[in-house]
Image (cartoon, grey):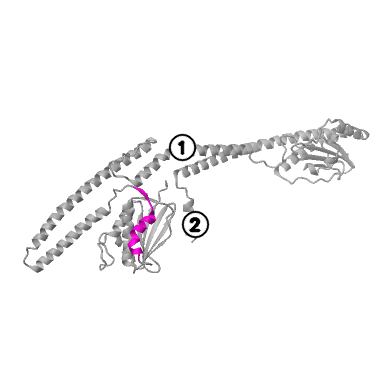
Amino acid sequence: MKTSRWRPLASRLYPRSLLTRMLLLTLLAVVLAQGISSAFWYTTFRAQDNEGLLNSSRNLAYSAAATVRFFKSLPLEYRHIVLDQLRNMGGTRFFVSLNEHEIALKALPDSDRKLMVVDAVSQVLRERLGGDFPIRVEFVAPENVRILNSQMRLADLPPSWANYALNLEPVHPPVLVTQIEIAVDEWLYLATPLPAPYVSLEDSGLPKQQIFFIVLMSVFLLSFIAILVRWQTRPLRRLARAAREMPFDDDRPPLAERGSSELRDVTRAFNTLRERIQRYLKDREQLFTSVSHDLKTPITRLRLRSELLDDDLLRTKFEKDLQELDLLVKSALQSVKDNDIYENMESVDVHALIDQVTEPAAKTPGKVTLVGRARRPYRCKPLALRRCIGNLFDNALKYGERVTIRIEDSRETLALHFEDEGPGLAPKELKKIFEPYYRASPNTPGDGLGLGIARTIAHAHGGDVEASNREERGLRLSLILPRDPVQ
């Protein structure tokens, strides 16, 4: 059940036109090519970015280690004097202070890049400083940086103190805070922002410029492909329309050979096919005209001679055989005439055709019911389609008291269902009713050619006629015709 439910949806979503398929394939190719190239580019870029971030972090660690050694070499009474000079005059890339205890900070969430930098900085500091004293390295958001004590924020410092070392405008990068216990109850505090261009510890995706370039290139490529496909398929659409209409009158010129060499070959083959069909139809017309003429004369002669017979019984048998022969000839000629496809294609109102066919029966209330409407005119051979609808309607009216005509119109097909309230047919007879001279009920008047002619006309329009029994009672004859997608 699920498979049958999803099948119509998949059928509607499946691209049918050459333009749609080309655009989808091109888009898929662009996405795959750009995805693969972007993946390689991103992997290389990320590796280079991580390497650059590690080198910058190690340089910060070397500078921090030099600053620590410098302050450890100063006498205790000079350390605060040097700190005041650094705050007022600058001279180091770090904001430096001495605290009595370690300041608790709200660290940034852990990430691969953050842990990589913290490990690299800690390793360099231990290599440079030696010893076994505590070292705390952490990244802190600028708004969470605390200075001197646990309450003073970076924004609370005098501008001259922080501008030299902690100028965070305009990108607000994470702040690397290093706290080292250089003596008992004496912690050296070093703070510096992450250096440009490494202003983030998060894994960055593709740059906006790269994404914009991919989108722009895809739009340009798809636009050019759409123009190219439309340019190349215009002769195909013209050829498809000519094949559907198939004009056989000699006055209309052959289809112009345009487009690529392949399209010219197809158009030339179509014109050759049309010319052969014209010759065949002309020869067939002459053949049946000759047959009609040649058969009528001996039949008339035999009928006259049968009247000279003295035996009444023999004369009656002769006349009966001649009537059957005459009927067979007329039926065959009528079948050829009704199957004639010399008409040219025109756009017709489907409802007008149905009204012309059903007008005599529609005068009786309730005998004909029309359900649904055609969305737009249908391009066809008007007389042939009227003949087809008339044969289907007459058959339904012949075997059922009332006829319901249901119209189902979509973008792809136009379906006319003729439903009667007759006895229906056995499953084995559903296909036989389209055979020439086959009659489901021998007592019903008719020659058994109507449904076969209707199906032949439907085939000439690229459609078909199908027969099925209704669930409640009666027979359903469905005329299914393809819609012209160019309309």
**Residue 442: percent from left, percent from top:** 25, 67
Disc 1 element = helix
In the image, residue 312 above or below residue 135: below
Q: Which residue is mark 2?
A: 6
Query: Mark 1 Cα within 10 Å, few/some/many (few <14, many 20+)?
Result: few
Residue 78 visible, this orientation = yes
Left or right: 410 with respect to 114?
left
Residue 65 numbered tag? none
For badge 1, the amino acid type reads Leu
**Residue 353: percent from left, percent from top:** 35, 56
Say which of 225 and 200 sits in front.
225
For badge 2, the amino acid type reads Trp
Q: Is residue 349 on the magenta stretch?
A: yes
- The quarter holding residue 161 reads top right
Say which of 312 and 143 sits in front.
312
Left or right: 21 with respect to 342?
right
**Residue 212: percent from left, percent from top:** 60, 38
Residue 132 visible, this orientation = no
- The quarter holding residue 140 reads top right
Disc 1 to disc 2, C-alpha distance:
34 Å
Which residues are drawn in magenta?
345-363
Q: Residue at point 40% right, 54% down?
A: 414
Q: Residue at point 29% right, 56% down?
A: 453
Say which of 287 and 381 sits in front.
381
- Label 1 or label 2, whichever comes before in sequence order: 2
Query: Mark 2 Cα within 10 Å, few/some/many (few <14, many 20+)?
Result: few
In the image, residue 377 above or below residue 194: below
Q: Which residue is mark 1?
A: 228
Number of disc labels: 2
